[in-house]
Amino acid sequence: MQIYTRTGDDGTTGVFGGPRVRKDHPRIEAYGTVDELNATLGLARSHTGQGEFEDLLREIQSELFDVGAELATPDPQAHGLVSVGTSEIERLEKTIDRWQQVLPPLTKFILPAGTPLAAALHLARTVCRRAEREVIGFAQAEPGALREALIQYLNRLGDLLFVLARSANYQAGRTDELWQRSSNRR
């Protein structure tokens, strides 16, 4: 299969079961950022080795592929592409609660730093928050075009990635690096 088609040379792309749209269309921005998030989780996985982090991130990557497919399709229900819902959101919440139980409570903001895994998870968290904003922007640009569950899933996923980044540091014996106001650094 040839990878290039030249059909996008005019600045448009096709959506599944729909028309060609500009590559900067809110739909394309939304699923493109979800794809970027998925790639950052792949980077994080490269630092996990085998174990619970690896399994969890792999599962989330698969779900994000489903989310991207739903976002890329004007009528996902007609094509059987409805993705995450209540059960996936509740699973993220339970996972957050379980991982957070062992972490010391936060009293200050922390810097997105630490082990390579923690840093990659912090990066994924920020991309997740941008994906969430892009999906919200798409929802506002095309009311009724997507399910609220997609926004809820990305919101919980951002929370989970923060907790996982802290957990990665904690398991490695590294404490969270606390943010200090500029007046306190001098």
Image (cartoon, grey):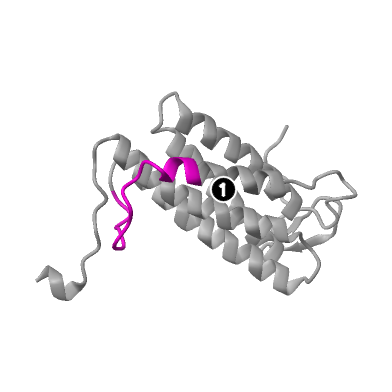
The quarter of the image holding the C terminus is: bottom left
User: Do we see residue 25 in this rendering?
Assistant: no
Question: Mark 1 belongs to which amino acid?
Answer: Glu
Residue 160 percent coordinates (x, y) = 49, 48
* Count of numbered badges drawn on the protein: 1
Residue 136 horizontal side relative to residue 165, left or right: right
Which part of the image, by quadrant, shows the N terminus?
Answer: top right
> Which of the 4 quarters of the picture holds residue 27?
bottom right
Instruction: Determine the residue located farthest toward the right in the rendered image.
Output: 78
| 4 part of magenta stretch | no
Looking at this view, is 13 or 159 the one in front? 159
Q: Quadrant of residue 18?
A: bottom right
Q: Is residue 105 above or below residue 54?
A: below
Return the residue found at the far bottom: 183
Along the viewing direction, whichever of 92 and 144 lies nearer the viewer: 92
- Stretch of the chain drawn in magenta: 97-113
Q: Residue at x 40, y 51 (%)?
A: 122
Name the main secondary structure of what is drawn in magenta: loop
Foreground of the two, 36 or 85: 85
Q: On the picture, is 24 further left or further right than 18?
A: left
Task: Give the percent coordinates (x, y) of residue 77.
Answer: 86, 50
Question: Does residue 156 appear anywhere in the picture?
Answer: yes
Figure check: 125 above or below 11: above
Give me the residue at 82% from left, 58% from top.
74
Residue pictured at 44% horizontal, 41% vertical: 99
Q: Residue furthest top?
A: 50
The stretch drawn in magenta includes residue 112: yes
Q: Residue at x 24, y 53 (%)?
A: 177
Residue labelled with disc 1: 93
